[in-house]
Image (cartoon, rainbow, N blue to C red):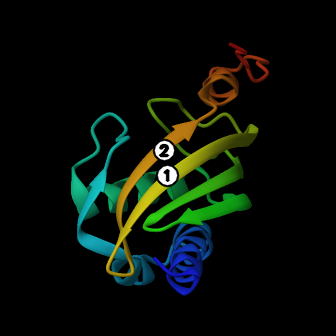
Amino acid sequence: MSEFHEQNNKSIVKRFYEEVLNRGDLDTMISLVKDDFIENSPVAGQAPGLEGLVQRINALRSAFPDLRFTLEEILADGEKVVARWNFSGTHTGKFMDFEPTEARLNVAGIDFFRMSEGRIKERWQFVDSVPLLGKLAGLKVESVRFVL
């Protein structure tokens, strides 16, 4: 795959974070994500495909109305794009069975995307969930790192 296609794939993923996640523009999401999208890291109760992605985005934006994803790094290799990000937001709505805490959260994560025909086809997501769940539960928890 050419460098042009890799740059284009990175641009599509950047738009997904900026326009869809940060601004909540679900119309743009439809143009960036394939109709037969596969979420390989669904949350409990998430429907499959595009419907589930819409549910997940709406739940996240409802629980954290001031949410902001910041891309720290983005890499492309052919049809694969990897994005390392930081999420920040104030927990003012119910999220994953946690009642609002008014806590300000900063969470790190990595998304792996597979592109197809210039759109997002699949996603795998890995989140540093220890500080996220700890803060939602009212605990002071720092990130846990394992070195092998």
Q: Secondary structure at mark 2?
A: strand
Instruction: Please provide percent x and percent y for residue 94.
Output: 50, 40
* Quadrant in which the C terminus appears: top right
Residue at the spot 61% in from the left edge and 57% down from the top edge? 83
Callouts 2 and 1 close, C-beta under 8 Å: yes
Comparing labels 2 and 1, the label whose residue is closer to the camera = 1
Left or right, 14 with reference to 113: right
Q: Secondary structure at mark 1?
A: strand
- Does the rendering let one see residue 89? yes
Instruction: Using the image, tell me which numbered label, if any, was put on residue 87.
Output: none
Instruction: Please provide percent x and percent y for residue 102.
Output: 72, 40
- Kind of residue sitting beneath label 1: Phe
Residue position for label 2: 125
**Number of other residues with Cα within 10 Å of mark 2, as a class: few under 14, some 14 to 19, many 20 or more:** some
Residue 100 falls in which quadrant of the image? top right
* Quadrant in which the N terminus appears: bottom left
Residue position for label 1: 112
- Does the rendering let one see residue 66? no
Question: Which of these two is toward me, 36 or 46?
Answer: 36
**Number of other residues with Cα within 10 Å of mark 1, as a class: few under 14, some 14 to 19, many 20 or more:** some
Residue at the spot 58% in from the left edge and 81% down from the top edge? 3
The relative height of residue 116 versus residue 125 in the rendered view (above or below) is below
Instruction: Please provide percent x and percent y for residue 87.
Output: 69, 50
Left or right, 13 with reference to 106: left
The relative height of residue 80 versus residue 64 in the rendered view (above or below) is below
Instruction: Please provide percent x and percent y for residue 7.
Output: 59, 80
